[in-house]
Each structure stands twice: as structure tokens, then as C-alpha cells.
Amino acid sequence: MKLFNFWGGVHPAGQKHLSADQPIQVLPMPARLHVPLQQHTGRSAVPVVKVGQIVRKGELLGRAQGGVSASVHAPTSGVVAAIGDFAAPHVSGLPLPTITLESDGEDLWLEREPPPDPFTLEPEDIAARIGEAGIVGMGGANFPAALKLGKARQAKVHTLAVNGAECEPYMTCDDRLMRERAEQIVDGVRLMLHALQAPNAVIAIEDNKPEAVARMKAACQSERQMRVAMVPSRYPAGSAKQLIQILTGLETPAGGRGTDTGVLVHNVGTAYAVHRALRHAHPLISRIVTVTGGAVARPQNLEAPIGALVEDLLAFCGGVAETPARLLMGGPMMGQPLPGTQVPIVKGTNGILALTAAEARLEATPSPCIRCGRCVEACPMGLMPLEMSKRARHDDLDGALDFGLIDCISCGSCAYACPSRIPLVQYFEYAKGALETRQRAEQKAKETRRLLEQRQARLAREERAKAEAAARRRAEKRQAKAKAGAAA
Ligand code: SF4
Ligand code: SF4
């Protein structure tokens, strides 16, 4: 298969050797799980259980609400111990609306029958079951998968790109999943193709994962619709827009979506979750997490229930050999700093990274920009990070937008390449947050204006109706008077 190139990118040290050869281990069920109601893009799920209620594994805890949302389910059987804000801060630093579940140690499933043959279902029904299972994009985007599939089918995409690139340094959970559960992933891909009504799927894997490539090729050798593409290892090859460019040579238009090119990207973990939902009627209640970094005693890949705490996973890996200089949820390029270890694993958590001071490069403090242009060379979106950061730093949001803030994928390539160690991505994240706040305020003001206008229109209608009724009454009185006069 002919492959293409993408602009920019960097070559950070992979560090995958720490965990790549560790087979997936199942994390023993913690005594308590803290299942956030908001683990996805869109509106939070609404609790459908009460404190004290006994639930089975896989039972619905929170129902999706509105167009963009995802349901959450019980990762084990037990009793609902609390509903409310979890005391520990989330990665965002904010408390998290959460359902706390106390395990009964039995791990008893709620009995549900999968469809006898999901390929006899209509594409919409497949998507609906994926939605009911609470599946979100597991590559980190956390967008509800059913919605993404539905929109892509309407857009008539021709190719499903199954993302097994895993370009983030240190992360090996997708590699292990492909090596150990290739047939299930391929089954999930077939089901997604049916839901999409698309003719082709390409499973893209970076060339630094030869075992995963071999396993996936073997698993799909009799699938005429599927191919495995070995893509060059260069960060961020696994980012959706760059992957599309590598596979098709097509660039996603500025401000556009990947599906504008006729390609939908889904992670291998999502394909695996789809298989579990359609073949076993299991909702998304666990995921594979890489626990790694120089500070972790025994780096591993763990299958962890959603809602297990970072401290549970670290403890199973022998704890930390030294105090981590940085603790992240996710990889070193796009991961989010964790405020502590009392943070629950969510559907989009691919890794826990505990870095030593040497790994974290904390020794270097930022110095002024020397206008070397390396950030521009590294940016895979063809942006000018130095100009964008200058504007973001001075709260000039429109200026940052003019330089393409909306197209920034926060990949961190620019910051990695910067010799002055300027925290460029932090400025972009700050500006994106400020932009969101501004848009929300504008939306609110627009809504307030609309409600005010509606009220004024209603009051005017009522006034008019009152005046008309009074005029009618006066006319009736006059007529009655005239009739009475004529009768006399
Ligand atoms: S890489 Fe850093 S120092 Fe060089 S131009 Fe960009 S921001 Fe400035
Ligand atoms: S973080 Fe944004 S500006 Fe920096 S390299 Fe990535 S896409 Fe470009």
C-alpha cells in the first residue's frame, strides 16, 4: 500500500521497552470504585441509581443525556455507596461528579443476551447498541463512538482507519492489545464497517511494533475489506489528521473534520470494545492502561476497571521506586499532569506515567524565544507556534485564532523542539480554555437576548389580545343597548 508523508513531527525517545514486553495483567478488583459521570465529550450522564442500591456488573449507573453524551455502567457488582462530587480533584483540578461503588467481591454480571448474529442487524441498530454500551473513542478523544459512526455513515465515508499507531512515547497498551487480542479487534472492525456501510478498513500500526503488525496481519488475512499498513514511527503519526494524510495523502481542510476526506479514524481499543458490546453484551467498564515511567517499580500493562484509582494501579505495579518528578495521565507529549494518585481511571485513560527528574527534563527553565523557527518546522499542522503563543500569552485570542489556534491539536511537538523550553502548549491550552469561556458567555448572552425578545413579543401579544377583548365587549354592550332601545 502506498503511503504518504505529513508535515513536521518529531522523534522523541520511545521508551516503550519499559512495558512493551509485559503481557496484560488483570488488576484485582479494588474494594471501591469511583465512576465519574462525565468521562466523555458532551453532557454528563444522569444517575439512575440511588445510594444503597445493589447493582450487578454491567448495570447502568448513569444514562446519557442529550445528543452528545455517553452512559456509564457498573464495573463490578456491589452497592452504591455515594453519589456526588468525588473528594479528590480530577486531572482538571475540579471535583468530579461521581458514583462510588463498593465491591461485594463477587463480580456478578447482569445477565444479558447478545444478538445471535449482529450482522443481521441494521447499521443503525449496531450503532445504537454501541451507544447503549457507553463506548467512546478510546484513543483519547472520548467522543461517543455511536455518534461518530452515525455521522460518518451519513457523510458516506469510504474507509475506516483503525488506529494502532500508538505514537505517544512510553505507551504500549494498544501494542499489547493487538498482540494479545487481534481476532477480537478484527471482529470489532468488521462490525464497525457494517455500522458504517463502508467498503474498506486499514489498520495502521507504527513500524516499531513488528509483533503487533504480524498478529494483526494474521488475524485479518481472510478479510478482503481489511489491510494492515505499517506506518513510519514519527510523532504524531497516530493523530487522526496526520494518520489520514499518511494513508491517503489527503489533508483535512482547516477547521474541518477527518471525515471530510472520506476517512473515519477509530482506535484499536474502540474496535475491541465494540466486539465486547456486540458479541458478549458487555458495556465499556474496563480498559487496558500502561503504567510506566522510570519512577514505577514494575512497569506493566493492566486491564483495570473504570473507576479504579491511580494509586490502585501503582500499588499493583510495586509502587514507585522514587518520588516521581512528574505524574501524568497519558503520555509525556499529550498527557495531563495529575494532582495526586486519588484520581480515577476513565474510559480515555491509556496510561499512567511516573517520570523521574531526568526523564521529565525539569532541570531546564524557559528562556526567551530566539526565533529559531524549530517550532514551525516541528508543527504537523503547518502553524506558527511562536506567533500563536505570543498572542495567547497576551490574551489576544483573536490574534491567536488568526494564526490557527483552532487547528492546533495540542500535540506538543513544538514545545518538544523548542531549545528555549518555552511551554508553548500550556499557552495554547490556556487560550483554548479562554476561548471556550468566551464562546459560552456569547452563547449565554444570545440565549438571554432571545428569551427577552420572546417575552416582549408574548407581552405585546397579550396586550393586543386584551385590547381586542375589551373592544369586543364594548361592541357587544353597544349592540345589546341598541337592541334594547329598538325593543322599547
Ligand atoms: S522553537 Fe522556541 S525559541 Fe525557537 S522560535 Fe519557536 S518558540 Fe522561539
Ligand atoms: S501543539 Fe499545536 S502548535 Fe504545537 S506543534 Fe502541535 S499542533 Fe502545532
Image (cartoon, rainbow, N blue to C red):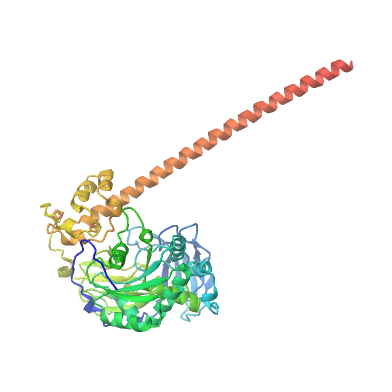
**Residue 73 visible here:** no
The residue depicted at 30 percent of the width and 83 percent of the height is 214
| Image location of residue 483, percent across then percent down | 84, 19
Asked whether 22 or 272 is in front, the reply is 272
Which residue sits furthest right? 488
Image quarter of the N terminus? bottom left
Residue name at image x 13 percent, y 63 percent:
363
Dividing the image into four quarters, tell me where ligand 2 lies: bottom left
Q: Position of residue 235 (x, y in %)?
A: 23, 67
Q: Position of residue 281 (x, y in %)?
A: 50, 76
The image quarter in which residue 461 lies:
top right
Please state, as top left, top right, bottom left or bottom right, where the C terminus lies in the image: top right
**Residue 109 seen in this snapshot:** yes
**Image quadrant assignment for residue 171:** bottom left
| In the image: residue 9, left or right of residue 39 | left
Q: Position of residue 6 (x, y in %)?
A: 24, 63
- Judging depth in this view, the residue of 129 and 257 nearest the camera is 257
Residue 136 vs residue 373: left or right? right
Count the marks: 0
- 380 to 331, vertically: above or below: above
